[in-house]
Image: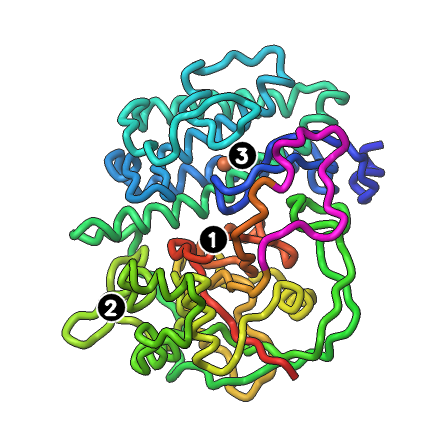
Amino acid sequence: MAAARRAGETKRATRRLATINANEGSQVLDIALPLSASGADRSAERDRFAAVRQQSETLAGHLSPEDQAIQSMPDVSPTKWHLAHTSWFFETFLLGPLDPAYREFDPAFAYLFNSYYEAVGPRHPRPERGLLSRPTVDAIAAYRDHVTAAMLRFIETAGEAVWQRAAPLIELGTHHEQQHQELILMDIKHVFSVNPLLPAYQAPRPHAVPPEPPAAAWAEFAGGLDEIGHTGPDFAFDNEGPRHKAWLEPFRLATHPVCCGGYLDFIADGGYRRPELWLSEGWAAVQQQAWQAPLYWRCEDGAWLIFTLSGERPVDPAEPVCHISLYEADAFARWAGKRLPTEAEWEIAARDLPVTGNLADSEHLHPCPDAASANDDPALRQMIGDVWEWTASPYVAYPRFRPAAGAVGEYNGKFMSNQMVLRGGAAVTPADHLRITYRNFFPPSARWAFSGLRLAEDL
Ligand SMILES: [Fe+2]
């Protein structure tokens, strides 16, 4: 039986569970969890679990206990909260229900580290996570060790019937923790950015520097009837399916994401002062929040500086612009006489590309210039990694999306409104967490994600 599953014949070990998205705090869904091909291998899942847990601790290892306690705005969570919450996830959805030998670490943690699961019970208010001086970083480290050890023991000793139920949950839990690893980096960047000392999370990483930004070039697509969405035995979040038909008119995509050089031209041309370029809500945000440039940019003596996880430095015109809202992406596209791609256009353009690029594993933790590209080459570059690319598509359910039978109805599609889809991963996204079909999403005003844009045009 195990061999058959490894061959991809998935046992539909269907589970119901409230789940998460990269936009932690913005989605709860009930999902049917198939036992994926990779999840069927117990030793592989054990290794992946151990590696993911270790990676969270490696990320936090750059930080002092004081760093790990700060919440700089309601959307940001303290590092130590992420470390505890990802442990709570395994404790609540896996060890508690499935391991009779498990002993809860601290009953109070269920209230502190539940993010938004109504069915699990009440929780500490999200905007007040930064008020939790206790439990300490050391206590949370002990909690993590307790949960990790229990999980490793469980993976090794669970009977086959229990394992069939547990494996999809463990796989989901590791992907959940990887989403929080990206959030740890997004959040600590914001935390450091509001400190006048502008601390650096890490030393700058060397990267190749092109002589100038890439010239505008385009890749063309014929359109027609096609399909998008996840299918097959490998893991995916429920919102990536079902695979379904999509009709596309002929279009073209820019070979590169928009770079800071182009964005500087937009700023210099009065981009933030011209209401005709903006969606109504976007123009209101510009005025109310006094936006003049992307988040983490500031102008000093006429020169633009950018704050990164490696500290502050001059803006590099050749690197993809990052930390812009959907409103800014849309205004830039209008200024350029182009538009944002739909998520179907993006996925069909990207579907044959390898899922490799400047992702978290490259350790730049910042978008890099494309030093390898010839300017007249019509091949798509940097689709994967560097920056999440805003699309013109609202985050809604795909056709025929349905949660598992009997799923708790209150959670269905709960957050599928008022958010927009982003595609492709960023320089802070774990590499083995990403897929071409991955749908990230944020409210159109959000800027603290590593978000940029790529232009599209009708043919
Ligand atoms: Fe979460």
Q: Is mark 1 within 8 Å of ligand 1?
A: no
Horizontal relation, residue 77 to residue 257: left or right: left
At x 49%, y 52%, the residue is: 442
Asked which secondary structure carries label 3, the reply is helix
Instruction: Identify residue for label 1.
Output: 443
- The magenta segment: 394-413
At x 54%, y 84%, the residue is: 217
The amino acid beneath tag 1 is: Pro
Asked which secondary structure carries label 1, the reply is loop
Q: Position of residue 201 (x, y in %)?
A: 30, 50
Q: 87 and 133: which one is in front?
A: 133
The amino acid beneath tag 3 is: Ala
Magenta span main SS: loop
Horizontal relation, residue 77 to residue 371: left or right: left
Q: How far, Cα to Cα, is label 1 from label 3?
A: 33 Å
The quarter of the rendered structure image containing the C terminus is bottom right
Q: Residues within 10 Å of mark 1 (few under 14, many from 20)?
A: some
Q: Residues within 10 Å of mark 3 (few under 14, many from 20)?
A: some
Instruction: Identify residue for label 2.
Output: 305
Magenta stretch: includes residue 411: yes
Instruction: Identify residue for label 3.
Output: 50
Q: Quadrant of residue 36?
A: top right
